[in-house]
Amino acid sequence: MKPETLCIHGATDRTHTTGAVCTPIYQSSTFAHPGIGQSTGYDYTRSQNPTREQLEQLMARLEGGADALAFSSGMAAIAALMELFSPGDGIVASGDLYGGVMRLFDNVSAKNGLHIRYADTSDTAAVAAAITERTRAIYVETPGNPMMHVSDIAALRALTSGRDILLIVDNTFLTPYYCRPIALGADIVAHSGTKYLGGHNDTLAGFLVTADAGLAEKLRFLYKTTGACLSPFDSFLLIRGIKTLAIRMERAQNNAIRIADWLLAHRKVTAVHYVGLDGHPSIAVSKRQASGFGAMISFETDSAETAQGVLERVRLILYAESLGGVETLITYPLLQTHADVPEDRRAALGITDRLLRISVGIEHADDLIADLEQALA
Ligand SMILES: Cc1ncc(COP(=O)(O)O)c(C=O)c1O
């Protein structure tokens, strides 16, 4: 089945008798047993719930994985994932990473004895050089947040092959509609489902999708033990959001291409970071491993005053953290998504007071450009 069709029909439970076209919300925390030692397949919602199960199966199908687990947020998913590792284990992670994940790595994972090394994961040789005998995972976000560095998933897989190293890919920016990391060799795919999958800036969610059943079993144990499961209602909202994923991604990307071109020509814009631009250093890798570029853009203005003026003046575009919804949002990484990242690391990445990030939504591109035009005037 093509992904467009899977998005719409991949969660439909045809076994129930009512003929309901949409997955029902099983708003029940617990399930009665038919007899001693018997189960309907559902015991307690932290372990499994029929609505969430439909969503998880849909995500596993979309990502081409063995199993998927739905969490109450992306951070809950990534925090649970870190429980796979033991004190002394090493992780090589993208430097270009959502600031909240860095905060988790630097403060919680480090306290728990994990050794996190940041590397430019768009440079496979740099990753190879960062691997030590204690390395147990390579963790990449691609495209990276907010500088849009692209990591070559298949090349990273070649580095981990035959070694006790998991390849973990955060696929939030592209979604399985544009990129399927498991087919390229990833062991685990992570998501903030809050973003494109939910798609409407109204629900928090997170996912881990595993390539094999063994990893799924380990994560399911951690899942029911640590407990950050997605509620039945939010599972329903995610199923509903995913139904329109394909058309939202296409529309947002078309808008992003127009906006990136427009920004490139603006006299107050000194650099545009968008994977779909011909000048992007990884456009070839991107075309090889993904069927689209997504709709995330970051750009640099000529001064901090210009950048801050845009944030003050936008009217239609909302100055807000987050991404991937139908509404276009503009973010100031320095003060928002990456505020907790140490200053030297921010500076090395290029996260300055002149950098803005746009999550392009699905409004009409003309209206978005008109708003940027008056905000940059
Ligand atoms: C790429 C990426 N991964 C993970 C997360 C964390 O997800 P959540 O906000 O749903 O906890 C975010 C949040 O912005 C993100 O941008």
Image (cartoon, grey):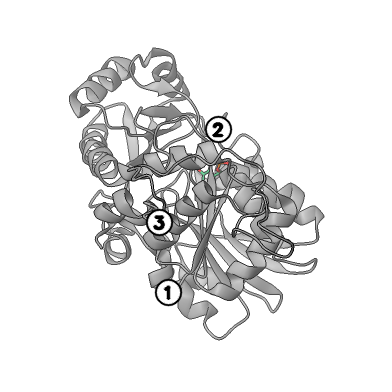
Label 1 and label 3: CA atoms lie apart by 42 Å
Tell me where residue 149 appears, x and y as whole percent. Answer: 42, 54
Q: Mark 2: few, some, or many residues within 10 Å (few <14, many ≥20)? A: many
Quadrant in which the N terminus appears: bottom left
Location of residue 328 with respect to 294 vertically, above or below: above
Secondary structure, mark 1, is helix
Left or right relative to 93: residue 328: left
Label pair 1/2, CB-CB below 8 angstroms:
no
Q: Estimate the x, y position of residue 335 in percent, counting from the top left.
A: 57, 29
Q: Which mark is residue 15?
A: 3
| Residue 96 visible | no
Residue at (32%, 47%) from the top-left corner? 294
Q: Please give left or right for residue 347 compared with residue 44 in the image.
A: left
The disc, 1 or 3, on the residue closer to the chain's N-terminal end is 3
Q: Residue at x 40, y 28 (%)?
A: 329
3 lies left or right of 87: left
**Residue 188's x, y, as percent?**
53, 65
The residue identified by callout 1 is 155
Q: Is residue 4 above or below residue 324?
A: below
Q: Nearer the viewer, residue 110 or 223?
A: 223
Query: From the viewer's perspective, is the residue at label 1 or at label 2 nearer?
Result: 1
Disc 2 is placed on an element classified as loop
Query: Is residue 125 among what the camera can see?
Result: yes
Residue located beneath label 2 in the image: 334
Q: Amino acid at mark 3?
A: Thr
The kind of secondary structure element at disc 3 is loop
Residue at 60% in and 58% down: 40
Q: Foreground: 67 or 343?
A: 67
